[in-house]
Image: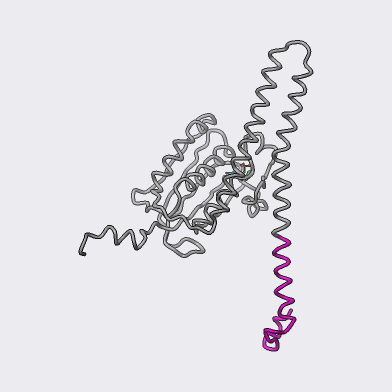
Amino acid sequence: HSTAQPRLLGFNEPDFYIVVTFHDITQAKLAEQMRVDFVANASHELRTPLSSLIGFIETLESMDERDPEAQARFLSIMHSEADRMVRVIDDLLSLSRIELDRHVQPRGRVDLARLIDDVLKSQTHDAEARHMTLEADLPGDLPAVRGDRDQLFQVFQNLVRNAIKYANEGSTVTVRGRPLDRVPESGEPGASVQVIDRGEGIPEEHLPRLTERFYRVDTARSRRIGGTGLGLAIVKHIVTRHRGNLTIASTLGQGTTVTVSLPLFEPAASDARQREPAGA
Ligand code: ADP
């Protein structure tokens, strides 16, 4: 409210401080609320499979007559519940590692075309299981980007996995790379990669929240097909750390396109000097 008469306020005026403090408390409260929600959500995500495991253990303990068929069925469910806990924990660990390094910008040289090829190869088995085709649309002159290869692998692997999980059986997933004049926000020259699927799409009201931790459009479905609700949060964190940009566009009944833009690789000045011939 003090902005209405800014010239009347000296820096020692108490009103000035009231405004700043109010803002800080709001931010701090928001951060605190997010932390509380996160702990509650994470606990719930781990408790659900654990409760189911305990239930099956008790059932197995109380089975008096031997029923190898039922036992095998229960053990297989227990195995997949335990696998789910491992996936949630692995994703949580990934997230915390990325958050820890968020102020350090990765500067390695990453050959995008090769990286995407490797990601697609790693997903052929899952794509075949759903009779889907993975298609790469990459120009020969796709420039190298700046970053951490393992983390960028994780970005595109998560996006291609989502496309395979949520698009229609038998459909084609396209990964399209293009040079880009300017990465939105940072303004640096870069490259963009789009992961395009022909699925049922995502209702518009969900789009802004998809990168929140544990946010899902259909929780039961995501859990059934092995989702943790953390994939896009991880993608967002990694892309931000790379000073890149992430957009998700979707049309109901047609499919979803996720676009990742990344800045180009630039050799550090010291590397360039090292490569110059002696005496140059
Ligand atoms: P999950 O592990 O549940 O897949 P993500 O963070 O990767 O978690 O995605 C969040 C949610 O966004 C998913 O649960 C799903 O509802 C929706 N989603 C993500 N990618 C797609 C896609 N390509 N098509 C349709 N829905 C998607």
| Extreme residue toward the left, this view | 279
Residue 112, given in percent of the width and then of the height, sits at 41, 48
Residue 100, given in percent of the width and then of the height, sits at 57, 53
Residue 10 located within the stretch drawn in magenta? yes
SS assignment for the magenta stretch, majority: helix
Q: Where 243 sits versus 210, above or below?
A: below
Q: Is residue 253 visible?
A: no
Left or right of 14? Residue 89 is left
Residue 6, given in percent of the width and then of the height, sits at 68, 85
Residue 51 located within the stretch drawn in magenta? no
Quadrant position of the C terminus in the picture: bottom left
Q: Quadrant of residue 218?
A: top right
| Extreme residue toward the top, this view | 65
Residue 37, given in percent of the width and then of the height, sits at 73, 51
Q: Residue at x 36, y 58 (%)?
A: 267
Quadrant position of the N terminus in the picture: bottom right
Q: Quadrant of residue 168?
A: top right
Q: Nearer the viewer, residue 104 or 200?
A: 104
Q: Is residue 69 visible?
A: yes
| Extreme residue toward the front, this view | 278
Q: Quadrant of ligand 1?
A: top right
Q: Where 279 sits versus 112, above or below?
A: below
Q: Nearer the viewer, residue 258 or 274?
A: 274
Magenta span of residues: 1-30
